[in-house]
Image (tube, helix red, strand yellow):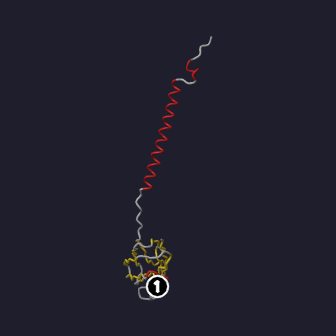
Amino acid sequence: MLKRNKFLVSGASPMGKTRLALARLQVAIMIAVIVVAAGAGTYALLNQKPTTVSNDVAISITETDPANQIDNFVPQNATVKAGAPVTFAVQNSDDEDRVFTIDAFNFNITIQPHTTQRGTFTPDKAGTFTMFSPQTKPSAASAGKPGSPCTGYLTVTA
């Protein structure tokens, strides 16, 4: 006559019950870790300090083609936030005095050759505005050729 194992009759061995209990414990721990991580992430997102928007802009007037006296702004475009003071640091890499203007904000600075000039204003309206440096007069420093005008764009966001 065959003897039945009492563990097989009940459906699980003591080892199988232990494994099942450990698996359930692991699932419970993983759920708890996920809930805590989600809560911490939500707390961090909701309690962030606002990032400071820098309205400092560095632009260089650079001679990109010396043979033809072609100058450009580098970078050619800038973006700032309306209502906050913006400081332009304009470096003149040219051999001549340069003027930098943003007519929409009545902003105008003159930069000596191979120097940097700073100027500050507060943009009071959003949009895209022209930055400009007019053509320079022919001189000995430019081998008798006029320096080219430079054009770029300032985007002011609300």
* Vertical placement of residue 136 versus 6, above or below: below
Q: Percent position (x, y) of residue 24?
A: 51, 34
Relative horizontal placement of residue 78, taking residue 1 as reference (left or right): left
Residue farthest toward the top in the current orientation of the protein: 1
The quadrant where residue 90 appears:
bottom left
Give the crowd class for mark 1: few <14, some 14-19, many >=20 residues within 10 Å: some
Q: Mark 1 sits on what residue?
A: 134
Q: Quadrant of residue 83?
A: bottom left
Q: Is residue 91 above or below residue 26?
A: below
The location of residue 75, given as percent across then percent down, is: 47, 73
Q: Residue at x 46, y 43 (%)?
A: 33
Residue 96 image position (x, y, % from top left):
41, 84
Give percent across and percent down for residue 19.
51, 29
As rendered, which of 91 and 42 lies closer to the eye?
42
Which residue is the extreme one toward the right?
1
Q: Can you say which quadrant of the picture contains the N terminus?
A: top right
Image height of 80 relative to 44, above or below: below
| Corner quadrant of residue 10 | top right
Of residue 144 and residue 83, the one placed in the foreground of this image is: 83
Q: Residue at x 42, y 88 (%)?
A: 139
Element marked by disc 1: loop
Residue type highlighted by circle 1: Pro
Horizontal relation, residue 128 to residue 121: left or right: right
